[in-house]
Image (cartoon, rainbow, N blue to C red):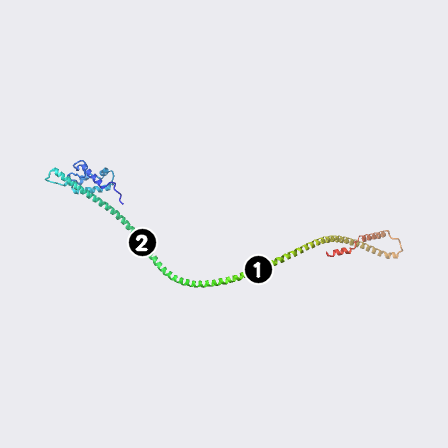
Amino acid sequence: MARPAAVSPDQIRTAVLAMLAEAGNAESTTPDTSVISATPVTRERFRRAVSVRRLRARLGAGDPAMLSRALNAIEAELVQAGLAEVALPGLPEPIAEQMRALWAAAVSVQLDDVVRMKAEARDAMEAAQVARHDADLRVELLRVELADLRAHLSARDAELATARTECRVATTTLAEREQAAAALRQSAERMTQALEDARTDHAAALAAVHARYEGLSKRLLQETEHQRHALAAERERLAKQFADAQTRITALEGLRERLLEEVAGGRDAHRQAVAEAAALATVVAGQRHALEALQALTPEQSARPASPAHPARRKAARNANVGHAATVAAAPRPRSRSSRSRKSPSS
């Protein structure tokens, strides 16, 4: 959209006429837009009286380019209209002045209408240009969108062709799948019927198993009760046997103590007997030597007359007799029959 002007075309026109009047182009000094002098307005006098800088300084605002265009349009109107070129010969000066004033007023009104129409036409043209520009932008956008839509349509056509091909393939596959599904339905119906039969058989077998389980459970309970009673009786019998065994173990422990004592006494007697046997062996050896000595002396005594015994020999014989008596006294006594009978169980 165009930027709105700071001043209107009417304000510009009024200011230009006022500046021309002040420059001596009007009869009076007041800026009356309806009273214009008879002096013709040329381009040189217009440009010498009015400029863009003066007009902008008078208005206090305005775009220089827009003010320049407005001044060019007003200059063309005033120069071409020839406001001061109306010549009325043969008329009195006052009437001529009035006629010129009337003519100037009519021309001013007409020029105002023309300026207004030009301003309206200019606004309409600017609006049309803006609309045209917007339309061009819209057209460009529509062209871009149309190109995008065409590309999109091309892609959609390709996708549609691919989708149609896939649809045909899917239709064929669907038909095959439906046939397979029908076969599977028939198989499922057969399997369902077989499953129902199996469930019926399973229910019957389960009922039979339950009945058998009930019988076995009752039988197991009875056998468990019987075994419990037998176990209790066996426990009582074992308790009695254990008590008897404890009694026998106590008696055997006492017997063991007695036997250990007898064994200890037998060991002592055995040691004493061994010592006595060794002493007897020593005595026997001594007696054997004495006997051999006596046997060696016997032939000599038979050859000689009897003589008193040698004192040393008598002493040796006496010692031998004494040793024999000590050995006999130290010999162990034979055991009694009762001790043998007590020792026999341990052996």
* Residue 143, percent from left and from top: 29, 52
| Residue 64: % across, % down | 24, 41
Viewer-proximal residue, 228 or 37? 228
Residue at the limit of the structure toward the top, as seen here: 29
Q: Earlier in the sequence, mark 1 or mark 2?
A: 2
Q: Which quadrant of the figure contains the C terminus?
A: bottom right
Whole-angstrom CA distance, mark 1 to mark 2, is 88 Å
Say which quadrant the N terminus sits in.
Answer: top left
Give the residue pinned by disc 2.
149
| Mark whose residue sits in front, 1 or 2 | 1
Q: Observer-nearest residue: 44 or 179?
A: 179
Q: Residue at x 57, y 59 (%)?
A: 218
The numbered mark at residue 128 is none
Question: Which residue type does callout 1 highlight?
Answer: Lys
> Residue 308 vs residue 192: left or right?
right
Image quadrant where residue 59 sits: top left
- Answer above or below: position of 108 versus 223: above
Q: At x 31% / y 54%, what residue is drawn?
A: 149
Q: Which residue is mark 1?
A: 218
Q: Left or right: where does residue 15 sit relative to residue 268?
A: left
**Residue 77 in view of the camera:** no
Question: Where does the image place residue 13, in percent across and percent down from the top left?
Answer: 21, 40
